Amino acid sequence: MSTILKEIKFNTLFITLNRPDVMNAFNTEMLMELQQAMDEAADNDEIRCVVITGNGKGFCAGQDLKDFEKENKSFKQALEAKYNPLIKQMMGLPKPIICGLNGVAAGAGLSLALACDFRIAVESASLIEVFINIGLVPDSASTYNLPRIVGLSKAFQMCSFAEKVTAVQAKELGLVNVVVSNSEVLNIALEKYAKKFASAPTKAIGMIKTLLNTSFEGTLDTALNNEAEMQDILGISDDYKEGVNAFLEKRKPKFTGK
């Protein structure tokens, strides 16, 4: 059985983590398949959005510790070979990634969710930085993404106490964009937002990701220069021309992602 399920529809690559018997915990095969899926999303121009959700009751429980112990690798080796490349692929992908939190996201499972751009959760879902419970620090960019969303103080609290955050609390903190009642409504919401993102100006979405992900790292001048350079690139795109024409003609634009 494949550790992930894939389907392309609405110009969107739908990815479902598929190890429900272990709450979709990561093993090596799943991480490698996710890396391959991100390569597919990057290389296929027809894919203009990615959705990641989980099969069963949980989104992702983090690393499968039994699988990790069998490999006999150091943590650094495992992170550099499996987790870090995936996170870089996701955050560097010039296309939006939607996370559908169908249940608990714990440890590296939460890191995966935080590396997405837009998160939708069912009310029963929860988020937890569980690393401290086994004497470890958060990894897979949790220490990069979490404080950018909730601030340093709350991030420290979540990481050091392994506090469980409910979906409603997560929305209040900005960790989740949308909360829905159940898994059936989640699937409807995922399709709704996938269609919305997949019909948007894809190049502009990709550049928004780049600008925001690097916004904490440079000066005001750096941000202004980056914005100006990207506006120049987008200003000669087909989508910009379509957007202007649609505005002048008082109609809804039909963006192609080019």
Image (cartoon, helix red, strand yellow):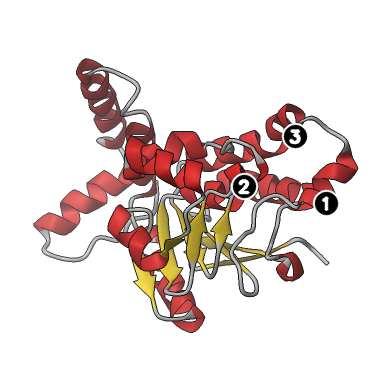
Q: Which residue is mark 3?
A: 78
Image quadrant where residue 254 sits: bottom left
Q: Horizontal and vertical percent for residue 110?
A: 53, 51
- Contact between marks 2 and 1 (CB within 8 A): the answer is no
Q: Amino acid at mark 1?
A: Lys
Q: Earlier in the sequence, mark 2 or mark 1?
A: 1
Does 212 appear above or below 218?
A: below
Q: How far separated are the C-alphas under marks 3 and 1?
A: 14 Å
At x 63%, y 37%, the residue is 136
106 relative position to 175: left or right: right
Q: Horizontal and vertical percent for residue 13?
A: 56, 60
Q: How far separated are the C-alphas under marks 2 and 1?
A: 16 Å
Q: Are there few (<14), some (14-19), or many (20+) residues within 10 Å of tag 1? A: few
At x 16%, y 66%, the residue is 251
Element marked by disc 1:
helix
Query: Depth check: 203 or 112 in front?
Result: 112
Q: Nearer the viewer, mark 3 or mark 1?
A: 1
Q: How far separated are the C-alphas under marks 2 and 3?
A: 20 Å
Q: Nearer the viewer, mark 2 or mark 3?
A: 2
Element marked by disc 3:
helix
If the image is split into quadrants, where does the N terminus sit? bottom right
247 relative position to 215: left or right: left
Q: Horizontal and vertical percent for residue 92?
A: 50, 36
Q: Amino acid at mark 3?
A: Ala
Element marked by disc 2:
helix
Q: Amino acid at mark 2?
A: Asn
Visible in this render: residue 72?
yes
Q: Earlier in the sequence, mark 3 or mark 1?
A: 1
Does 256 appear above or below 203?
A: below
Q: Could you say which disc has been placed on residue 133 in the image?
A: 2
